Amino acid sequence: MQRKRPLVVGADGTIAAALIRALEARGQRPLATTRSGRPGTLRLDLTEDLDAWTPPADVGTVFLCAALTSTALCRTELDMARRVNVDAPALLARRVADAGGRAFFLSTNLVFDGSVPAPAPDRPVCPRTVYGRLKADAEARILALGESGCVLRLSKVIQPGFPLFASWLAELRRGKTISPFADMRMAPVSLDLAVRAIVGLDQGGRAGIRQLSAPDDISYARAASLLREAAHAPGRVRPESWKTRLPDLEHVPDHTTLDSSLAAGELGLTIPASEAVVARAVKELQ
C-alpha cells in the first residue's frame, strides 16, 4: 500500500516552511503549494476559482497554513479575504476528507474578544475583528468534517530572528529610542513548539479544537525592555499607547492567552512563560 503524503498549503509562510522541514525529518516526503508554483512546489492560488481542484491521489493530511492575516486588509478586501481564509481552505479540506484524508487548520486567538484570559477550546467564539470572524467561520466548516478535521488555535508565534525584535534591537544598538505599545499584549510561543504541536496532533489523529499559547500575557513594551537589557543596548524604550499611533485599529484584546491544557496533556508539552519565550528569541538574535 502506498504511504500517504502530507500536503502543506502555503509553503512560503513561516510556520509552513518549518512544518515542511519537520515532516521531512520524519521521512514523510511532504508535498507543498505556493501561489507562484516555484520549483519544488505545486501552484495553488487561493484567490482563484478552485472548483476543479482535486487533491493528489497520495495525500493523507492537508495542512491549511495559508491565510491573509492582515486585519486591515481583511477589512478593506473582504471578498478576497473570505476566499483565502474561509472558502478555499474549506473546499480543500472537504475534497481531501472526501478522498479519505484529514484536514488540519491553523487558527488564531482572535476568534475570541480577549475579554477573559485563557478561554477553553469549547468556549463560544466571540471575535471582534473581521479576521477573527473569518477564522471562526472557517473553523466551523473544518469541524463539520467530524473526525477528519482538526483545528489548532495559536497565539503569536515567534521564530528565530523574529523581524520585530530584530528591528527593535537594531535601533537600540544605534542609541535610538523605540516606542513599543504598553497596552498591546501577546502570549508568545516559539516556532518549534508550534510545529511540534502540529505534528504531534496529526500523528495522534486528533480531531476537534486544540489551543496553544504561553500561559501569560506580556506587553510589547515589556518585551522590548527585556531585549534592551539582555543586549546592553544604549538606546531607550519609551512605552506608548497603541491609541496614539493606531487609533483606527478594529480591536486590541486585553488578553491573548488560550487554555492550552488539552494539547499540552495529550502531547506531553511544557509550555514556557512569555518572558522565557522572549528571552530565548533575544538570545537567538545575539
Image (cartoon, helix red, strand yellow):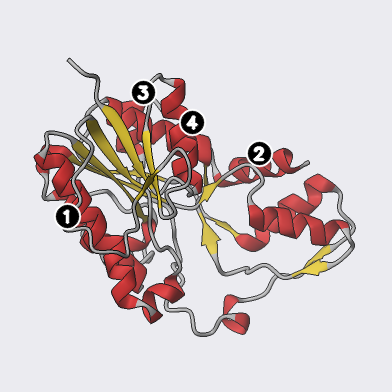
Q: Is residue 117 left or right of residue 243?
A: left
Q: Position of residue 271 (x, y in %)?
A: 47, 36
Q: Residue lying furthest front in this view?
A: 39
Mark 2 closeness class: few <14, some 14–19, many ≥20 residues within 10 Å: few
- The mark that comes first in sequence, 4 or 1, is 4
Tell me: residue 46, above or below residue 205: below
As shown in the figure, which amino acid type bears the numbered disc 3?
Gln
Q: Position of residue 13 (x, y in %)?
A: 48, 49
Tell me: residue 186, above or below residue 207: below
Mark 4 near mark 3, Cβ–Cβ under 8 Å? no
Residue at label 3? 28
Q: Which one is in front, 230 or 174?
A: 174
Residue at label 4? 21
- The mark that comes first in sequence, 1 or 3, is 3
Q: Position of residue 159 (x, y in %)?
A: 58, 44
Mark 1 near mark 3, Cβ–Cβ under 8 Å? no
Mark 1 closeness class: few <14, some 14–19, many ≥20 residues within 10 Å: few
Whole-angstrom CA distance, mark 4 to mark 3, is 10 Å
Residue at label 2? 280
Mark 2 near mark 4, Cβ–Cβ under 8 Å? no
What secondary structure is marked by label 1? loop
Tell me: residue 53, above or below residue 26: below
Of circles 4 and 1, the one toward us is: 1
As shown in the figure, which amino acid type bears the numbered disc 1?
Ala
- The mark that comes first in sequence, 1 or 2, is 1
Mark 4 closeness class: few <14, some 14–19, many ≥20 residues within 10 Å: some
